[in-house]
Image (cartoon, coloured by chain):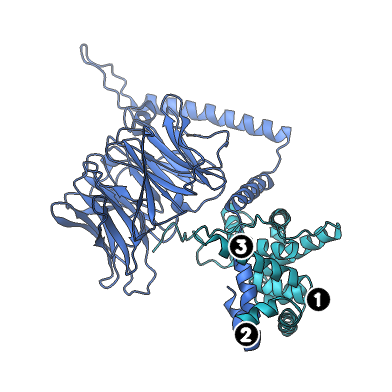
Chain colours: A blue, B cyan
Amino acid sequence: MNKDVLNQIPADEQPVASKLNSAAEDIQLSPAFQWELETQLMEKYKTKTQPALGWYTKITTAVGWAFAAICVVFLLNWTIRSLVPSISPASGETPTVTISFEGNVRAGNICAGPLAVAHNFSVSLTNQDKTGFVPLDGQKAIGELRSFDWSPNGQLAVVGNTAGNGNIYLVDSADNSLQPLIFNSELGYLMDVAWSQDGKQLLIWSLKDTTSVYLVHVDRTDLLERKFVPQLFSIPQLSPDNRSMVFYGADPIFAGLFELKFDDSQVISISPLVEDENGFAWSPEGSRLAYIEMDRDLGEARLVTMGDKMSVLATLPIPKGSGSSIPDVANLSWSQDGTKVIFDFGRSASDRVIYLAYADGSGFVKVVDSAYAPTISADGRCLAYISNKQVFLLDLTGVSLSSTTSTPLLLADLPAGRAIADFRLDKLQWRP
Amino acid sequence: MTTLMNIQTQYPLMDDAHLAHQARADPEAFAELYRRHVTSVYRYHMAHTGNVKDAEDLTSQTFMAALEGIRSFRGTGSYIAWLMGIASRKRALFFRGNKPQVPLDAALHIPTPSLPTEKIASRRLQRDQILSALQNISHDRAEALILCFFSELSFVEAGVVLGKSEAAVKMLISRGLQDLRTRTSIALEVEYE
């Protein structure tokens, strides 16, 4: 509503002015059109900013790259020869060859299994030697692929939408093809999906009704709607016993972190100080819930774990006062062995910081600046994250409470995707 | 607090002029400008054409032209006024081509599935009446009303698009509202409420 204009309209014209306002507000863009036009614009932007290369330029560039590659090979060869001791190993001794972090990653010796990324309404998986990403829907036959979730047993579920109707796909691990589980559903525009801890059920959240979630059995035998009073702001997480779910939302009194018991539909407030949708996660074994509280009175953000007892693993300063603009927390997750909690914290994509906290309460450490979407590989060796539109890996053996000695390894550029989405929709997750 | 229902972008505090400057080299900045103003442009074209298909087509043309000409926006004035200037020219070209004006179609997208059917129908009818009424008053007055109420421009910004002073726009708005009140069916509805 254009309040500035309305305030300057004489009182006797206000009723007609209000009618005009109502008529204007009733005109809404179809999400499908908005989406399609944004895609067209971005494609046009790309072609507009990419200057056409002539044959001379192309040949010059190719020759230049080839020459550079030859130089690098010679330089590496010379460097390796000069570093390796010239004496041959003693008879009977096996020569030990140290393979670099990068070599181990590319060979699949560490950080095995694909890394999935959701970016710009597209979902991709790393290729075999982890030198790039391969989009799941390379033909772009589906309107958009918005998000995904790995089940604890390594099944990938992807949520997509076509012209406002939601689809849920399971990815066939043999060829990475998308197998529809729910297709063109009447559940409306689907926002996200989450697996149960036993890998048998999927929790689906739609924009059509933010006071409902849907539970679908992976063998398609059951689709159950759960309605409740608080409004959801993000995808909930099922408890380890599947008898409740934890979610960030708001009831008529306050917003915060809630738990809904399925047996009696009772809603319990866990913490009214939780302010972010991706600031909570169950530990892999399901015994602890980690979440971040924003205590504006004390001026601190607290990473809390709730299990047999409550523990504060980390505190970070935030501005005091209810009206203050505070950073947000996102992408909170656990390492597979349950010893570490990782999250990013900041106001924008460029000023975010990744923190790692030890679940035993021994401390926490700032791992990377200007980065977000952290995730730890199943073997606990690699930390993957996004920085400056690229995906990096960090060797976690070089990270301790006292120092970080690892050098980030550039994995690949983020895939282009379909259209530009907010960076907060970016997600990285290793296969468990 | 951030929620997916109310996504903040990485340019939450950047004004349009700076974004437009950045959009020369950064597609995300242009996308942000698009998201900020696409509804205003679409409503402007809907108000003029009364037809979803034509409004979408003109909205598309407007943003394509904005993308082509983003370097010509010097940042000295309002970006939305510059954009609506493009929209206005696209609209003029559209009607110059003698394309027939068709009534509001029934496929207007109203994302309020919880509303009862009768209420939705009633609101559609009301909007239909208002858009028809706008076509029955002078072009300048209707254009000022559409820019300020449908595209949510300020009087000053509307003045830039119309090539008139702020005071002149206020006068057009006032007269336009009077016209709607005294000469059209909106008057009856207002009086009965």
Q: Chain of mark 2?
A: A
The correct choice, above or below, for B154 with respect to A92 in the image is: below
Q: Which label lies toward us, 2 or 1?
A: 1
Mark identifier at residue A8: 2
Q: Earlier in the sequence, mark 3 or mark 1?
A: 3
Left or right: B163 with respect to A411? right
Question: Distance from label 3 to label 1 (Cα)?
Answer: 28 Å
Nearer to us in this view, A110 or A295: A295
List x then y, in percent, for residue A363. 20, 54
Q: Which label lies toward us, 2 or 3?
A: 3
List x then y, in percent, for residue A415. 51, 40
Locate the N terminus of chain A by quadrant.
Answer: bottom right
Q: Which residue is mark 1?
A: B138
User: Do we see residue B21 in this rendering?
Assistant: no
Q: What residue is shown at x 74% (from left), y 65% (from top)? A: B48
Instruction: Please identify the residue farthest to the bottom as the structure is shown.
Output: A11
Mark identifier at residue B121: 3
- Residues under numbered marks 2 and 3 in contact, where contact means CB atoms less than 8 Å apart: no
Q: Chain of mark 3?
A: B
Amino acid type of the residue tagged 1 in the rendering: Ser
Q: How many badges with numbers are in the image? A: 3
Tell me if mark 3 has few (under 14), some (14-19) or many (20+) residues whose alpha carbon lies within 10 angstroms of its own: few
Tell me if mark 2 has few (under 14), some (14-19) or many (20+) residues whose alpha carbon lies within 10 angstroms of its own: few
Amino acid type of the residue tagged 3 in the rendering: Ala
Q: Which label lies toward us, 3 or 1?
A: 3
